Image (cartoon, rainbow, N blue to C red):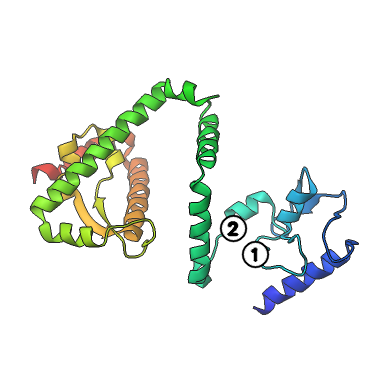
Amino acid sequence: MKQQKNIIMERKNWIGNMGNRGGSISWIPDERTLICKQCGSEQTFSNKYSYRRAMGISRNPSDLSNCKIENAGLCGKCRRSAKRNWDNVTDEYREQCRERSMKYWSKPENIENARLEAIKKMGYSSLEEYFQSDEYKSQSAYRTYRKAVDKRSRTNLKRCRPDEYKRWKNNTYDGTNYETGLTIEHKTPKSVCYEKGLTVSQAAHINNLEVIPMKDNIKSFKEWEQNRKIYEKMYGYNTYNKKFLIREEWWNK
């Protein structure tokens, strides 16, 4: 808290030395090159408003509540790589973040812009071009496969483990209960089952299912991917993938 107050005071002094009049930041010098306080690299901004955001300066210097103190003075690369300490974040702040996110993504134009940016990074100039590509057809086939696996997984869980199905049904993950909301985990991920050419019945087999919270689901997937990369380096891609299919025939157990 003391360090935070010192940063605020330094920023107030910095704002005061800029020559602003009447307590507002209506004027910022033409010099808009930031020297990163972490890596020392220089970053020049195209306008004063981008520079002001990077420095964490509020429009109203008397109200610094909207300033990002932790990332102020960092270049773009360091800001992106900065780890946020969510342990010290209040529940009120979490709720504000969730509400802002829901409000942003509730607007169709924001969704459309995000889709356009994504396909441009993939090398396509328009949605029409992307929809006609082989890549889209492949992803569409995977989405169909994934939905079929999810549907069959719910059916198998309900029939073979009714108690677990009831537990999942009563506390299903809904996007807000990250810590406690339950999901139907596939021990071997659906994406891998699709990649290996497994059928929907094999991917959704009861021996491949487990009911766990969303937090553990994501952690489990990351660990699985990490171990996969290690074994592929140890045995080679082709050798590992052959051993995978022989060793993991859970549908025959």
Q: Secondary structure at mark 1?
A: loop
Residue 156 higher or lower than 246, as above or below: below
Q: Residues within 10 Å of mark 1 (few under 14, many from 20)?
A: few
**Relative to 12, is 134 on the left or the right?**
left
Q: Residue furthest bottom?
A: 2
Find the distance from the CA under tag 2 to the CA under tag 1. 9 Å
Q: Residue at x 71, y 55 (%)?
A: 53
Q: Position of residue 126 (x, y in %)?
A: 53, 25
**Relative to 246, is 36 on the left or the right?**
right
Disc 2 to disc 1: CB gap under 8 Å: yes
Q: In terms of image quadrants, where is residue 3? A: bottom right
Q: Quadrant of the N terminus?
A: bottom right
Q: In terms of image quadrants, where is residue 10? A: bottom right
Q: Nearer the viewer, residue 220 or 86?
A: 86
Closer to the camera: disc 2 or disc 1? 1
Please give the residue where the numbered disc 1 appears in the rendered image. Answer: 70
Q: Nearer the viewer, residue 223 or 163?
A: 163
Q: Residues within 10 Å of mark 2 (few under 14, many from 20)?
A: few
Q: Position of residue 131 (x, y in %)?
A: 43, 24
Please give the residue where the numbered disc 2 appears in the rendered image. Answer: 82
Residue type at tag 2: Ala
Residue type at tag 1: Glu
Which is nearer the N-term, disc 2 or disc 1?
A: 1
Q: Residue at x 74, y 75 (%)?
A: 6
Q: Position of residue 242 (x, y in %)?
A: 23, 35
Q: Position of residue 187 (x, y in %)?
A: 24, 50
- Residue 204 visible at all: no
Q: Secondary structure at mark 2?
A: loop
